[in-house]
Each structure stands twice: as C-alpha cells, then as structure tokens.
Amino acid sequence: MSMDEPARSGRRRRGRGPSEAPKRDVNYRQLRNLFPPMDVFPADRIAQMHETALRTLEELGMKVLLPEARTLFAKGGARVDEDSEMVWIGRDMVEAAITSAPKSIHCHAGNSQRDFVLELGSLVFQAGAGAPNATDLERGRRPGSARDYIEYLKLTHHFDVFQMISPQVEPQDVAPHLRHYFTTEAQVTHSDKFPFVFSRGTPQVMDCFEMVRDFRGLSDEAFQAGPHCYTIINTNSPRTLDIPMAQGLIDFARHGQMSIVTPFTLMGAMAPITVAGSITLSHAEALAAITLTQLTNPGAPVCYGTFTSNVDMKTGSPAFGTPAHFQASLAAGQLARHIGLPWRSAAGSASTSNDVQAANENQFGLWGCLMAGATVIIHSAGWLEGGLTVSYEKLVTDAEVLNMVAELCAGAKAGEDEIGFDSALSAVDPSGHFFSAPQTMARYNTEFYEPVVHDYANFGTWTERGAKDASTRATEVWKDIVASTPDLGIDGEKLASLQDFIAKRSAEGGAPPES
C-alpha cells in the first residue's frame, strides 16, 4: 500500500476493468468507540478503589530499583529510603501528575494520513505482540526469527485496522546488542504506521530515537514536540518498578515520546484474587509510573493502562477471555475515566492453537475492552498461549472480527441518499424486490463489508471449493500478503543514511540491553 493510496477495509483486491463498479473505500484509521461505556462497580466503589490506590502509594510505597528514578521522586516530594529502595509517593504528587498528563495525544506516523489521536472515546487496535515464538499451519511453532518479524510486520501493515505497530515477535536470531537496529529499520522500511521501541536501556533507546528522527527528516525540536514512537512499560507486580522500565519512563518522557504504562497483574498470583483488589493494585502501580513521567517532564505523553486477568488456580497458568478478565477491563475503564486519561487494555487467548477456544477467548476479551471504552486495545489479534506465540492464521481470522467492529465504529450514514425515498422506496412496487433498484445498482459493490477470510457459500459450493476451513483459508491470505511488497515511497538517501548509521554503530559494538 503506497503512502498516497486511500485506506481500505483490509483485503487485497484484483484489478477491475474501467466499466466495472467502484471499489469499496473505508477508512479504519481514525475510529471512535460508539459503544456506551459499561460499569461493573458503582461510582462510589471506583472512588474508593482510587482512594485505596493513593493510600497504597502513601503508606505501603513502591520499590523502585533505578537510583535516578528515586532521585526524581525525592525531588518531587516523595519519601525515599535508599537502603530498601522504597519510595512513598504522596497523593499531592499523584494528583499533580494526573493534572499535567495530556488528556489527548496526537501520535505521528510515518505517513501523516495514518496519524491518530489517543483520548477517551477514540479507538485504536494493535496486534498481538512480544511473543518469543511464531506459528503457522505450514511451518509449525518455532522460535521467533528475523524472517518472522518481517513477515508479521507485513501482515500488520496490510490491515488498516491495526493503526500502530506492535512489538511483534522477538527475532531471536539477531544478536541482542544489534536487535534494536534490525527492528527499527524493519518498521520504518516495511510500514509507515506508528512505530514501537523497546525500553531496554538508554543506549538502545537513543539509537532508536535517532534512527526514527532522521529517517522521518525531523529536527530535534520537531521530534520532541510530539510522539513519533512509543514504548510499553510493565511494572513488576506487586509494587516494583525495575531498572529498564523506570529508565524507559524517564527516557521517553524526557524526549517527548509516549509511554503506555501497563501493570500486568494476574489475580491470585501477583495480585489479589478479587477483581476489585487486583485492579486497585494495578491502578496504584500505573499512577506511580505516570507520576515518574510527569516529574521528568510535565506534559509528557503517557497512556494509562492495565492488563489484568486471572490464573487457572489448578495450574497457575494465565487465563484470558474469562469473566474476570472482562470485569477487570470494565473496572479499569471506570478508573481511567475517573482520572480522565486515555488508556490501554488488552484481549488475548491462552489457547495453544487457532481453534474455537482461541476465538471465544479473544472475542470475549475484545468485547470487554470495547464495552469498557478502551482507547488502545493491544493483543487484539494473533495472540496464543497467553502471549508465548503469535499465529499468522489467528492474526488473519481475528483481523476479520476487528474489521467488522471497525465497520460499526467508522460511522454509519443516514442522509437522503441512504434513506433512498426516490432511489429505492418509490422505485419498487409492493411485493417486488430491490435487487435492481437504482440505489442497489449504485451501491451493490460497495455497501457491505467484504470479508477477508469468511466464506458465505452454501455447503455444496464450499465442498466443491475444497471444503477449506477458516484457518486453511487464512493460510492462503497470509501467504498472499507476505509475498507482496507495498510501495511506501521510501527516500533512497534517507534509507542509505539509516543503513550507514546502523553499520557504523554495529561496528562500534552496538548497544547491549540493560538489565
């Protein structure tokens, strides 16, 4: 897809002759969530959970392993004990941070047509991410590789419903001290969407900032004026902020780039077993991280987040798409609205294959996010095994569902042409049909969503076509996408400069991740 090509619903189409009907054109890039937010707890209980989170930070504190972060907290008025690395954060500090954190964040993609705004009410999808393994029906489950990273990137770029690039799949065949060069180059050359940068230490982050800045042709001032990339920050529940994550919060805030703060709390394991207790802990940890960004740089873009589900109490394994997961998303949405910040939630599946369980879990988790009013929905497609694997087929079948959600959220029209008194209602006699009505003839090829992988044929036709199930059809779809190379209109000089930078830094030893 070229930078100038209009947004599509997500399916590659064969060329048509000039006399044929126009192609369907739908913009999935700037969506609004049309579903009224659903509450799981009364407003007074949400206020009490917020109050308890503030009390937790004041009385119990956070363990912060990075000395620079503890210094920033101390300068902001927190009580710090260097021996225990504990930080007690006053509610006045948290309230000041909530006030200074932006309520609306303009995210700058490589192509300005792909820019989007994060705020309460907007809706952004991101594919399943961060997995060490990849799988598909042809090659099976395997450790993530550079090839998998690029193929998965091509898939997520292809579908407009994914507005931002996810952390993808880990390319384990690329050395850790060089991996960030590979992932950043791949993102800016295979996609023009909003890129992701891992927080694996300041040297790697600064390399990535420089690569994105220069490839986009930005000055330091323009780069820092608004986010051109983002990271995801996970706290170590309960109540711990480790060195790379704290450093990431500081680095991204200092340079005006966006952090999505995401405590990963599992009920009954590293969080209380109740929805209310686990979400209260998650809220406290998120507030602590948000406070650190605002102490670093008031007004720095930061997104509130949570990823809370339960464990299977028989095995201890994470479970997703459960009633508790759904309820936790609703509670997190209430707390996000309570503080007024854009926020991130997540779907996902614990299934080991792209089966009915995987579809059920992902869709139930997805609807929890939608009804909770999530701004960003991460792991919305492709995730298996609780994040240990990304599936090519599942990404395609999940994208089908996301496309249909996007159809609902892209905006329905009800003008005179759509009501169609002259072109439809008055054009058909009683007991007639609308197949040949002027309105139908003008819209038959563009009015309805065109599926990517779903098959609406009857049993006989489906059998004649080979009786292929959805996963088999999804294999054909992803292979077709991976075999293509979209024209992004890349500037040859900028590409050469990027590759020279990578070669120079690699020869100097790269940048090992910090732990």
Image (cartoon, rainbow, N blue to C red):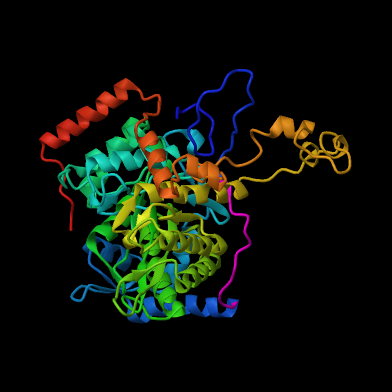
Residue 36 in the magenta stretch? The answer is yes
Q: In the image, which residues are magenta? A: 31-42
Residue shown at the point (62%, 50%) measured from the top left? 408
What residue is shown at x 48% (from left), y 34% (from top)? 112
Quadrant placement of the N terminus = top left
* One can see residue 149 in this view: yes
Q: Is residue 428 above or below residue 202?
A: above
Q: How many marks?
A: 0
Q: Is residue 365 above or below residue 89?
A: above
**Where in the figure is residue 145, as x and y percent of width and height?**
22, 44
Residue 344, above or below 30: below
The prevailing secondary structure element of the residues shown in magenta is loop
The answer to which image quadrant residue 439 occupies is top right
Q: Nearer the viewer, residue 195 or 417?
A: 417
Q: Tell which of 205 and 431 is nearer to you.
A: 431
To which quarter of the image does residue 148 belong? top left
**Residue 95: horizontal and vertical position, in percent?**
47, 68
Q: Is residue 346 visible?
A: no
Let me know if residue 227 is in the magenta part. Answer: no
Could you tell me which residue is drawn at 76 percent across and 40 percent down? 418
Measured as percent of width and height from the top left, residue 353 is found at 34, 57
Left or right side of 358 for 122: right
Q: Residue furthest top?
A: 18
Locate residue 163, reporting x and y percent.
Answer: 46, 44
Side of 318 where 142 appears, left or right: left
Residue shown at 60% from the left, 33% from the top: 24
